[in-house]
Image (tube, grey):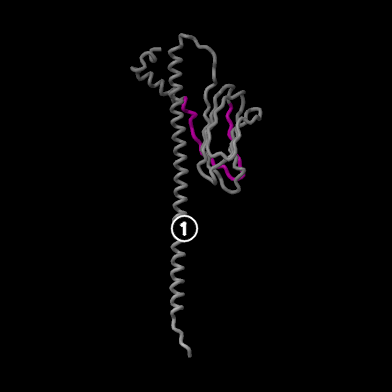
Amino acid sequence: MWCFGKFTMMDSKCLGLLFCVLCTYLTNVNAYFITVDAHAEECFFDKVETGTKMGLMFEIAEGGFLDIDVKIVGPEGKVIHQGERETSGKYTFAAHTSGVYTYCFSNQMSTMTPKVVMFNMEIGEKSSTEDKPAEDGHQNQLEQMIKELSQSLSNVKHEQDYMQVRDRIHRSINESTNSRVVMWAFFEALVLIVMTVGQVYYLKRFFEVRRVV
């Protein structure tokens, strides 16, 4: 393909094609925030074909000890992955059969604290072992390069989402720690004032000259 042979001098038409293909590959790259209430479970579903690559990434942004139960279930009800009290994680697998795959976030262990979860389920392409004609070699190579670039951009976006969540968590911890320090300092100052007033009153009564009538 001419565009591939002249890749360093690609015209506007090829650049437009590359941009459109990249946008197509990045359509499903989204991070979602959900709130899982205490004693609740939130589940999501994706219908895929056999051999499709799937990747679940999640991070607990707020709530309690920043932990949650995670479970991935296949079409036959078989548990593919199950984790308890996890703070973050990334689990990648290939669909062993066609059907609906379910992934759930459970906050059953919490008594009153809701959890805010950031997650992303990346749906890849169905793996194929079929041989393609040699005459399409240049086109296949260009498509492979676009896929690799798309995957790299997806990874960068995932890292950005992860860093945003980590920054949000650290900011929340810092604000909570700062408020506790301020309250403790206020309490110490109040105790010091009360003790000072009490000591002054006690010493005044101790040195008071009492007259006997």
Question: How far across and down, in percent of the image, does residue 69 sit?
Answer: 59, 39
Question: How far across and down, in percent of the image, does residue 67 sit?
Answer: 55, 42
How busy is the neighbourhood of tag 1: few (under 14 within 10 Å), some, or many (20 plus)?
few
Question: How far across and down, in percent of the image, does residue 140 sit?
Answer: 46, 15
| The quarter of the displayed image where residue 107 is located | top right
| The quarter of the displayed image where residue 84 is located | top right
- Viewer can see residue 186: yes
In the image, residue 124 above or below residue 64: above
Q: Is residue 35 magenta?
A: yes
Q: Is residue 97 magenta?
A: no
Which residue does the numbered mark 1 point to in the structure image? 184
| The quarter of the displayed image where residue 101 is located | top right
Front residue (pair 136, 170): 170
Question: How far across and down, in percent of the image, does residue 65 sit?
Answer: 54, 45
Q: Is residue 20 left or right of residue 77?
A: left
In the image, residue 47 above or below residue 109: above
Q: Residue furthest front?
A: 207
Front residue (pair 145, 48): 145
Q: Residue furthest bottom?
A: 213
Q: Residue furthest left?
A: 9
Front residue (pair 22, 203): 203
Q: Which residues are magenta?
A: 25-47
Residue found at x 54% / y 25%: 53
Disc tally is 1
* Disc 1 element: helix
Amino acid type for the residue under numbered disc 1? Trp
In the image, residue 158 above or below residue 17: below
Residue found at x 41% / y 21%: 18
Quadrant of the drawing holding the N terminus: top left
- Viewer can see residue 42: no
Q: Is residue 1 left or right of residue 35?
A: left
In the image, residue 49 above or below residue 2: below
